[in-house]
C-alpha cells in the first residue's frame, strides 16, 4: 500500500511552532499533518494518505458514535543528541492495537503498515519533535467504525485508521512530585471478560466518574481495584502500578499480573526487563489493599509508582480510601523509582546504551 502525500499549504511558521514548543502541555497542540487509511471488509486497507491535519467529515450514523467501536494507541518520538529522531518499541504498539482489535471485532492492521505510517508522519513533521529534555512528540494512532448503520447485530464493515501527533511536555504539571491516589469503592474500570485489556475509548469514558471522585476527595488519581472482590490492586489512572519492596541492594519490584482486566503497558514491560539489569529483581503477582497498607506501615514497601508512556514514572506518595489513609516515603520521589526512570529516559533520549534494541530510528 502506497501513501498519497498532500502537504499542507499553510504549515505553522517557525515562530508559531517555537511558541507551542516553549510550553506544549499535553495533547493540546497538533502537528501540520495526519495519516488516514481506510478499510472495508471487501477491499481490506486502502486509500492511505498523509494529508494536512484537519477535521474529518463523518456520517452521524457512523457505528462508532452509537456503539463505540474504537481503539487507540499511544507512543512517543524522541530527539537524540545527534539531532536524529527515534520512536520507542513501535511494534509493541502495533501488536497491542491488533490485540485490542480482536476484542473489539475490528480489523487487524499489518504491523509494517502501522510502523510505516508512524515513520511517515513523524518524518514529515520532525520539526515538531521538541529539543527540551523530558519533552517529546506524542503519537496517537486511532481506529474507528465508519459504516453508517444502526444495526447492532454485527460489527461495522468500514473503518478509518488515523494517526495524529502532539508535542508533549510533562503530563503532570507537578513533574515527578509524588501524587495522591484515591481507592475507588464505587466504580470499577474493568471486569473479567470485559474490555479492560483493550485500549478502547469506552474504558476511558467509564473512568471519568471515578477520576472525578478522586479529585473530590482531594486526590490526583484514582486506583482501580478488581471488579469481583474489590480489593486486588490493578491500575492507577491510566498507568500500571509498580511496588518497590526493600531498598538499596535488597530492592525488588512487584507489579500486578495481567489478569485480563489490566492494560499491558509497554512501559510496564520495559520496567520488568530493565530492573533486573540494574540488579533489581522484578516479578508479576497479586497485591491487595490490606497488604499495601500493612507493607507501608512495616516499611517493607518503600516506594510505589505508576508508569505509562505519557507520564513515564509518577511516584505515589499518599493513599486515601473511604476509611483509611496512609503515606509512602517522605514526599520526594524514591531512589529506585528515579533510577528506573533515568535508565528508561536515557535509552529513549539516546544518552544511555540500548542493549534491548528498543529504539527505532525514523
Ligand atoms: N494502563 C492504562 C489504562 C493506560 O491507558 C495506559 C497508557 O496508555 C497504560 C496503562 C500504560 O501503557 P503504556 O506504558 O503502553 O503507555
Ligand atoms: C499513557 O501513555 O500512559 C496514557 O495513559 C495515555 C493517556 C493519555 C490515555
Image (spheres, rainbow, N blue to C red):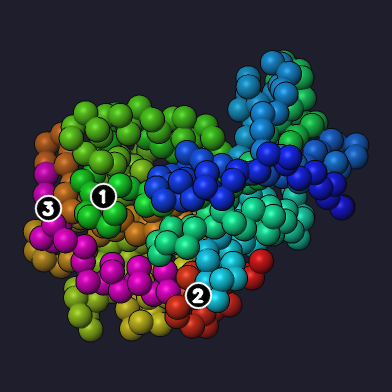
Side (left or right) of 170 relative to 155: left
Q: Can you say whether 313 is above or below 347 in the image? A: above
Q: Earlier in the sequence, mark 3 or mark 1?
A: 1
Closer mark to the observer between disc 2 and disc 3: 2
Where in the figure is residue 349, as x and y percent of width and height?
Answer: 48, 70
Instruction: Answer yes or no: is residue 292 visible.
Output: yes
**Could you classify mark 3 by the number of other residues whose Cα lies within 10 Å: few (under 14), some (14-19), or many (20 or more)?**
some
Side (left or right) of 55 relative to 129: right
The image quadrant where one finds the C terminus is bottom right
Where in the figure is residue 135, as x and y percent of width and height?
Answer: 43, 58
Which residues make up the magenta segment? 325-346
Q: Nearer the viewer, residue 217 or 138?
A: 138
Q: Quadrant of residue 210?
A: top left
**Could you classify mark 1 by the number of other residues whose Cα lies within 10 Å: few (under 14), some (14-19), or many (20 or more)?**
few
**Residue 334 painted magenta:** yes
Q: Earlier in the sequence, mark 1 or mark 2?
A: 2
Q: Earlier in the sequence, mark 2 or mark 3?
A: 2
Side (left or right) of 310 relative to 103: left
Closer mark to the observer between disc 3 and disc 1: 1
Helix, strand or loop under label 1:
loop
- The residue identified by callout 2 is 81
The residue positioned farthest toward the right in the image shown? 42
Distance from disc 2 to disc 3, alpha carbons, whole Å, reads: 39 Å
Residue occupying image coordinates x 46% and y 56%: 309
**Residue 241 painted magenta:** no
Q: Is mark 2 within 8 Å of ligand 1?
A: no
Helix, strand or loop under label 3:
strand
Where in the figure is residue 214, as x and y percent of width and height?
Answer: 25, 34
Side (left or right) of 190 relative to 55: left
**Could you classify mark 2 by the number of other residues whose Cα lies within 10 Å: few (under 14), some (14-19), or many (20 or more)?**
few
Q: Which mark is residue 327?
A: 3
- The residue identified by callout 1 is 174
Amino acid at each position: 500500500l502506497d501513501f498519497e502525500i498532500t502537504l499542507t499549504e499553510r504549515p505553522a511558521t517557525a515562530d508559531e511552532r517555537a511558541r507551542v514548543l516553549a510550553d506544549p502541555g499535553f495533547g493540546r497542540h497538533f502537528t501540520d499533518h495526519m495519516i488516514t487509511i481506510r478499510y472495508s471488509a471487501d477491499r481490506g486497507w486502502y486509500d492511505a494518505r498523509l494529508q494536512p491535519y484537519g477535521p474529518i467529515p463523518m456520517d452521524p450514523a457512523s457505528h462508532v458514535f452509537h456503539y463505540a467501536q474504537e481503539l487507540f494507541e499511544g507512543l512517543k518520538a524522541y530527539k537524540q543528541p545527534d539531532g536524529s529522531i527515534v520512536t520507542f518499541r513501535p511494534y509493541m504498539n502495533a501488536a497491542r492495537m491488533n490485540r485490542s482489535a480482536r476484542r473489539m471485532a475490528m480489523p487487524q492492521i499489518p504491523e509494517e503498515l502501522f510502523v510505516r505510517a508512524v515513520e511517515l508522519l513523524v518524518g514529515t513533521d520532525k520539526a515538531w519533535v521538541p529539543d527540551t529534555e523530558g519533552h517529546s512528540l506524542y503519537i496517537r494512532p486511532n481506529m474507528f467504525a465508519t459504516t453508517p448503520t444502526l444495526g447492532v447485530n454485527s460489527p461495522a464493515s468500514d473503518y478509518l485508521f488515523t494517526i495524529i501527533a502532539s508535542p508533549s511536555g510533562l503530563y503532570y504539571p507537578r513533574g515527578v512530585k509524588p501524587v495522591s491516589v484515591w481507592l475507588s469503592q464505587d466504580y470499577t474500570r474493568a471486569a473479567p471478560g470485559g474490555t479492560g485489556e483493550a485500549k478502547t475509548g469506552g474504558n476511558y469514558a467509564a473512568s471519568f466518574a471515578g477520576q472525578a471522585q478522586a479529585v473530590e476527595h482531594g486526590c490526583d488519581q484514582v486506583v482501580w481495584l478488581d471488579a469481583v472482590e474489590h480489593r486486588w490492586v490493578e491500575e492507577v489512572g491510566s498507568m500500571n502500578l509498580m511496588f518497590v519492596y526493600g531498598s538499596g541492594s535488597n530492592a525488588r519490584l512487584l507489579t500486578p499480573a495481567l489478569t485480563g482486566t489490566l492494560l499491558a503497558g509497554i512501559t510496564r514491560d520495559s520496567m520488568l526487563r530493565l530492573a533486573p539489569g540494574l540488579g533489581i529483581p522484578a516479578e508479576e503477582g497479586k497485591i491487595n489493599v490490606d497488604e499495601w497498607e500493612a507493607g507501608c506501615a512495616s516499611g517493607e514497601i518503600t516506594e510505589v509508582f505508576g508508569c505509562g508512556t505519557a507520564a513515564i514514572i509518577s511516584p505515589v506518595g499518599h493513599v486515601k480510601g473511604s476509611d483509611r489513609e496512609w503515606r509512602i516515603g517522605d514526599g520526594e520521589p524514591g531512589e529506585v523509582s528515579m533510577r528506573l526512570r533515568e535508565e528508561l529516559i536515557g535509552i529513549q533520549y539516546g544518552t544511555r546504551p540500548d542493549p534491548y534494541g528498543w529504539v527505532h530510528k525514523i
